[in-house]
Image (cartoon, coloured by chain):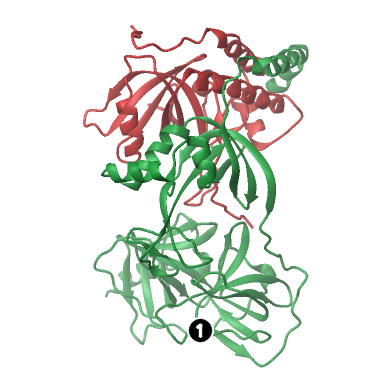
Chain colours: A red, B green
Amino acid sequence: MNAISIKRNPAKRVFAAELRDIRKTFKSGNDVKSPSFALLPTGERANRVLVCGILMNRTNSDKGTWVRANVMDITGTFSVSASGDFQPETKRQLTRIDITKLTYVAIVGAPKLFRPSEDATPTVSVDARQIYTITNAVYSQWVQDAAQATIDRVKVLTSDAETEDIVSARDIYGDIKPVEWVEVARNALAQLSQIPVPTAQTTLL
Amino acid sequence: MSATTEKQTLQNIVPISDVRPGRAVTVIGKVAVIQQAVHHSITQKGIITDATGAVQYAEFGSAAALIFRIGEWYKFENVLGNQYLGATVLNITPFSIVTPLTKEEVPDFELPAPTPLSERKLGVIPAIRAKFVSEWESRSPNIYQIGVLADETAGIKFILWNDKSNPNQPRLIQGKVYTVYYPIVNVSDGHEALNIHSGVWVQEDTDIEACMTALQTVPTTTKSNVTVTGFVTTILPGSGLIYRCPVPKCGRRLTVGNICSNHDYQESPISDLRIKAVLDDGQTAYTVVIPRAVTEKLTGLTMAGAADISARDPRHEEAVRVKLDQMVGGRYLKCTGTMLGEYLIATDAEITEYVPDSSAKTLMEIMALKQSLTAVDPVINEDVSE
């Protein structure tokens, strides 16, 4: 019997570097309520991700139905979007944040994959469900958290475990050595002490 | 109707047992049960049956709907098989055509034979023959009777929902054997339940050997002194200043207009302050309920303060939730309390502050992992290339 339980999925802690490399999304079943997942390169499925970073390059769509922005963490940047139709409150919050200051944000969202054409490189975007402005102390906490989560995933990936996700990840992300993700986590932690303190005067450009 | 068009329509008709998710079909069936549609986009729902099986249907958004009647036969053209909560269902869409059958068109039909309970699947079972072995106390006004039904092969929890339109709703009698038609198997709280419909049963004179071994009990897992540290991803609706039902032992949160779901309108509700939050540790998303005393200690926001915010802001109680969202949302939180099913009832909660040196352990793990990975790297590459 394939019992379906509607449970909130955990938000996986993922660095931008890993998030950008996602190349596969899938639905876990063919039920109306089956959740969709992105397959992380470190071999775990993620329905939600928790990502933190500095918000920048915000653009509104022509009709104002959605907002798109970039978020930069210690390892790279990625794009986030919020739709006014589905997440009006999140869109309002995203619009209100002052991007002329270095503002750290925490975003809980669903990673989505866009493939403009069949042979084009897909791009990853996080569909924001919740957005919070955070202090750089919380951001530092998240970096520690994400580093630990990343190496925990690598440990399972490089062990003898043969879960469906790991087999699939080895197939799709086979050309990325797992040790590279360990390096990403190490670099992120090494730069922790250099995290700038946001000030009102600092601008990005 | 010409011979050819009639043939074309007939070709698409499938028996109800052949309805599969993702396929548009035409079925001929009798409306066996009509259920109350609770969702605003569903105009009517129920169960249709033919000689081969039974399936739940739901009609979506046609304003000029044909209102189905129990026991009547209809032809459902271009209805869509779908899957809902693990069961196959039939969606009647705005593209579907439903026509009542004339008396001459109604096919032969007999009531279905009972299926052994051990062969149950999620969805509608045409019929079961089972003994009402034990009755539990109903803790909800919506549940008319709850207990265990068992046949020779298996036992299962059943729920008979309260039919508010019928003041003389018939009851099942404990110890008797019944043939129950069109019950629906679903999963709630991770346990299977058989949902039976009021009066759609026949009491049998025979007795059966009820199987008691396969019966699953329904324990609510309670674990005290659990500590969870995670990120507060959401402050849920129902956080902040709330109003509770004053009836002893009730204490439910009242909805807009001071309505308790059990006791209707309440003149003098009891106000309360709490946080319902999603605390996510990266592996599990816990729902944490932080009661008033712990909320006050955590945020410094008192009942009086919350009432003040509520009174000054046109959004009223929602403003309190937003305030709590600003204070607790997007922070790392450590909660200790009792785990009740999927809820953590907090007895203590504190925001965890950043400790700069705490990444030392992670760094050591990273070094060890890097070393072992660089050593075995060639082997991994070989695995990949195969």
On the image, the x and y values in percent for residue B193 come to: 60, 66
Horizontal side, residue B142 vs residue B146: left or right: left
Pick the residue in front: A200 or A63: A200
Pick the residue in front: B365 or A197: A197
Which residue carries the number 1 mark? B199
On the image, the x and y values in percent for residue B98 come to: 32, 70
The answer to whether A147 is drawn above or below residue B81 in the figure is: above
Residue at point 61%, 19% (across, down): B355
Can you tell which quarter of the image residue B7 is in? bottom left
As helix, strand or loop, the secondary structure at mark 1 comes to: loop
Horizontal side, residue A184 vs residue B325: left or right: right
On the image, the x and y values in percent for residue B249 come to: 54, 66
Furthest residue toward left: A63
Furthest residue toward front: B304
Residue at point 61%, 16% (across, down): A185
Residue at point 69%, 49% (across, down): B223
The answer to whether B365 is drawn above or below residue B299 in the figure is: above
On the image, the x and y values in percent for residue A117 come to: 39, 26
The answer to whether A123 is drawn above or below residue B64 in the figure is: above
Q: Quadrant where the C terminus of chain B lies? A: top right
Q: Classify 10 Å Cα crowding around label 1: few (below 14), some (14-19), many (20 and above).
A: few
Please state the chain letter of the residue tagged with numbered disc 1 in the rendered image.
B
Tell me, yes or no, if residue B58 can be seen here.
yes
Amino acid at circle 1: Gly
